[in-house]
Image (tube, rainbow, N blue to C red):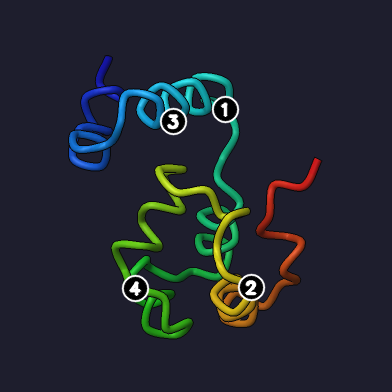
Amino acid sequence: MGKLISLYNTLHEASLEKTVDVIDKRSLSDNVVNKIKEKRILCGMTQKELSEKSGVNLRTLQQYETDAKDINKAGARMVAYLALALGCRVEDLLDIK
């Protein structure tokens, strides 16, 4: 329940369809750590540091880390900047199945 409540700030103005999609995705991936967050932690960076190093807006980065935004729908330049800042490949950040 706490996880659902924590999504309020991100989803309180979203459409019902978007809210359901995010909750479904979160429930399926409860035990899966977000790829960006995992790489960031391995690099020993805070969200703010990654934001500054990559040039990606802090709020946007937070939304990608919480899966409120889909990294697969991000612009190529943004994903490339994140990958460069994290020292990894673009493919390492995307959810490619």
- Classify 62 as above or below 13: below
Q: Are marks 1 and 4 in contact (CB under 8 Å)?
A: no
Residue 57's label in the rendered image is: 4
Q: Earlier in the sequence, mark 2 or mark 1?
A: 1
Measured Cα–Cα span from mark 4 to mark 3:
21 Å
Left or right: residue 18 versus residue 12 is: right
Specify the farthest residue to the top. Answer: 1
Q: Residues within 10 Å of mark 4 (few under 14, many from 20)?
A: some
For this rendering, which residue is in front, 29 or 49?
29
Measured Cα–Cα span from mark 1 to mark 4:
25 Å
Quarter of the rendering containing residue 6: top left
Coordinates of residue 81 in the picture (x, y in percent): 57, 80
Quarter of the image for the N terminus: give it.
Answer: top left
Measured Cα–Cα span from mark 2 to mark 1:
24 Å
Q: Residue at x 56, y 74 (%)?
A: 82
Q: Which residue is mark 1?
A: 29
Q: Residue at x 20, y 32 (%)?
A: 8
Q: Residue at x 72, y 68 (%)?
A: 90
Residue 22's label in the rendered image is: 3
Amino acid bearing label 2? Ala
Q: Earlier in the sequence, mark 1 or mark 3?
A: 3
Q: How many numbered discs sit on the rendered protein?
A: 4
Coordinates of residue 76 in the picture (x, y in percent): 63, 73
Amino acid bearing label 3? Val
Residue 76's label in the rendered image is: 2
Amino acid bearing label 1? Ser
Measured Cα–Cα span from mark 4 to mark 2:
15 Å
- Secondary structure, mark 2, is helix
- Secondary structure, mark 4, is loop
